[in-house]
Amino acid sequence: MFGGLKNKIKFGIIITLVIINHFMFKTLIPLELPVYSLFKEPTSIEDISNPFATLIIPKIKVKEQLYPLNDPLNQVELHPEIIIFNNPAKKTGPILIAAHSGNTKVSFFKRLDHLLIGDIVHLEYQDIQYTYQVYLTEEQAKKGFIRINEEGIVLILTTCHPHKETKQLVVYAKMQ
């Protein structure tokens, strides 16, 4: 009964060469790993995390997945980070999202300063697309936090100002 399983495991053994740098010598050591162990556990955070929303800003060509507040992928070093989230369907309060500007692969808001009053931002959440329209942009002193000057059902996007080192850019958009 178990002979077939033994054969599958035997054929599933792979030999991997691991390079170990030890005292300036490079030694090749064979390492045997069963194939099934390579697929038993998640190989990255992406395997266990699920995005729950998507931020779309057509004018600046942003379409990025968002992760829940307590998710390890909800961090500005990986994706746009949700700082405050209120369910847009319930219309109870603001949503605040921060991302990097700059010139790296995680600089999702590098062109946020191109948004003007009247531009559109979409948030897809629970299979519904919510549309927001930009009505205010402002600069604030860069102090590690921002003042939210608006109350109610607004989407707030923020990043370091791409051209002014001591400023934070804040964009407000109202649900349509």
Image: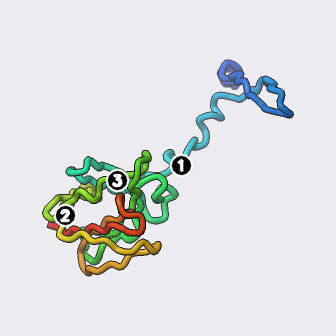
> In the rendered structure, which amino acid carries the disc numbered 1?
Ile
Q: Residues within 10 Å of mark 3 (few under 14, many from 20)?
A: many
Left or right for 125, reference 5: left
Observer-side mark, 1 or 2, equals 2
Q: Residue at x 32, y 69 (%)?
A: 95
Label 2: few (<14), some (14–19) or many (≥20) C-alpha neighbours in 10 Å = many
Instruction: Kindly indicate the quadrant of the structure image that contains residue 123.
Output: bottom left
Q: Which is in the foreground here, disc 2 or disc 3?
A: 3
For the residue pair 17 and 14, the one nearer the viewer reads as 17
Foreground pick, 11 / 173: 173
Amino acid under disc 3: Lys
Per the model, the C-alpha gap separating discs 1 and 3 is 25 Å
In the rendered image, which quarter contains the C terminus? bottom left
In the rendered image, is residue 1 in sight? Answer: no
Q: Residue at x 22, y 59 (%)?
A: 115
- Which residue is disc 2 drawn over? 132
Q: CA distance from mark 2 to mark 3?
A: 20 Å
Q: Amino acid at mark 2?
A: Tyr
Labels 2 and 3: the sequence-earlier one: 3
| Secondary-structure class at tag 1 | helix
Q: Position of residue 6 (x, y in %)?
A: 71, 23
Q: Tell me, yes or no, whether the two marked residues, 1 and 3, touch with CB atoms within 8 Å.
A: no
The percent coordinates of residue 97 (x first, y second) are 36, 64
Quadrant in the picture for residue 90: bottom left
Mark identifier at residue 45: 1
| Residue at 24% from the left image edge and 79% from the top image edge | 152
Classify residue 141 as left or right of residue 18. Answer: left
Q: Tell which circle, 1 or 2, labels the residue nearer the N-terminal end.
A: 1
Q: Which quadrant would the N terminus be assigned to in this image? A: top right
Image x and y of residue 124, in percent: 26, 56
| SS for callout 2 | strand
Q: Which residue is mark 3?
A: 110
